[in-house]
Amino acid sequence: MIPTFIDSEDFNNIDFTENPLRKAEYDNCSFTNCNFTDSDVSSITFLECQFDTCNFSNANIKHTIFREAEFMDCKLTGLQFQDCNPFLLSFNFSNCQLQFSSFYKLKLKATKFIHCNLNHSNMTEADFTDALFENCDFKHAIFEHTILKNADFSTSENFNINPEINVIKQAKFSKENALGLLQHYQIRIV
């Protein structure tokens, strides 16, 4: 069966929990105020697509392809991004809720996270070289064997990153948030 190709279409106010999104390749499409909660969007291809005010919470994204995808004001709680097709995987997030999401072992160099909530997210063994984390909240996020070379955390908060088990060479931190690098030592700074 030849996959369906959908180009430059706008999808607005659609509840994909009731009417599942057709398995296809979506190129340069926009999705606005759409509900994908608990939906199966596995094996769908999204190329240069924009998602604005969409809810993807707990959606099945196994083998889904995201290339140059933009998520704005979206709820992406509990997403297992490591289940996506990793080939040329690339996306950026702005004002998104990413609590309990997992980026385990993904290569996400130069990814932008702007004003995002990443509480309880799993960043283990991922490569975030040159990533921008602008005004992000990392309360209870897990960083283990994560590559953060040249990543910018200077405006983010509540992270706990152990420099002994993560690669943080040339990463940027502010004086105020640098304490997040010392928490595992259980010291008190007065």
Image (spheres, grey):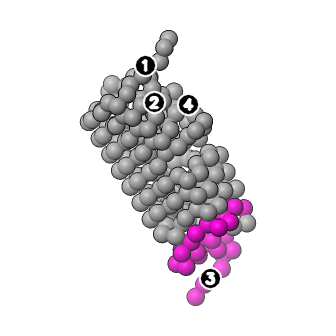
Q: Is residue 21 left or right of residue 140?
A: left
Q: Is residue 88 above or below residue 18?
A: below
Q: CA distance from mark 4 to mark 1?
A: 17 Å
Instruction: Name the kind of residue labelled 3 in the image.
Output: Arg
Residue 97 lies, in percent from the top left, at 42, 52
Does the magenta segment cover residue 4?
Answer: no
Q: How many labels were placed on the picture? A: 4
Q: Are marks 4 and 1 in contact (CB under 8 Å)?
A: no
User: Is there CB contact under 8 Å for labels 2 and 4?
Assistant: no
Which three-letter amino acid code belongs to the residue tagged 4?
His
Relative horizontal placement of residue 135, taking residue 54 as reference (left or right)? right
Which label's residue is closer to the chain start, 1 or 3?
A: 1
First-in-chain label (1 vs 2):
1
Q: CA distance from mark 1 to mark 2?
A: 14 Å
Give the distance between the C-alpha atoms of the residues marked 2 and 3, in whole angstroms. Answer: 47 Å
Residue 161 seen in the current view: no
Q: Are marks 2 and 3 in contact (CB under 8 Å)?
A: no
Name the quadrant containing residue 6. Answer: top left
Q: Of helix, strand and loop, which one carries label 3?
A: loop
Q: Is residue 168 magenta-colored? A: yes
> Would you name the residue on which mark 1 appears?
4
In this rendering, which labeled residue sits more in front, label 1 or label 3? 1
Whether residue 108 is visible, yes or no, is yes
The mark found on residue 19 in the picture is: none
Secondary structure of the residue carrying numbered label 4: loop
Residue 188, numbered circle = 3
Q: Which residue is mark 2?
A: 41
List x then y, in percent, for residue 41. 45, 30
Q: Amino acid at mark 2?
A: Val
Give the residue at mark 4: 63
Predominant SS along the magenta part: loop
For the point 50% across and 37% down, which residue is it? 66
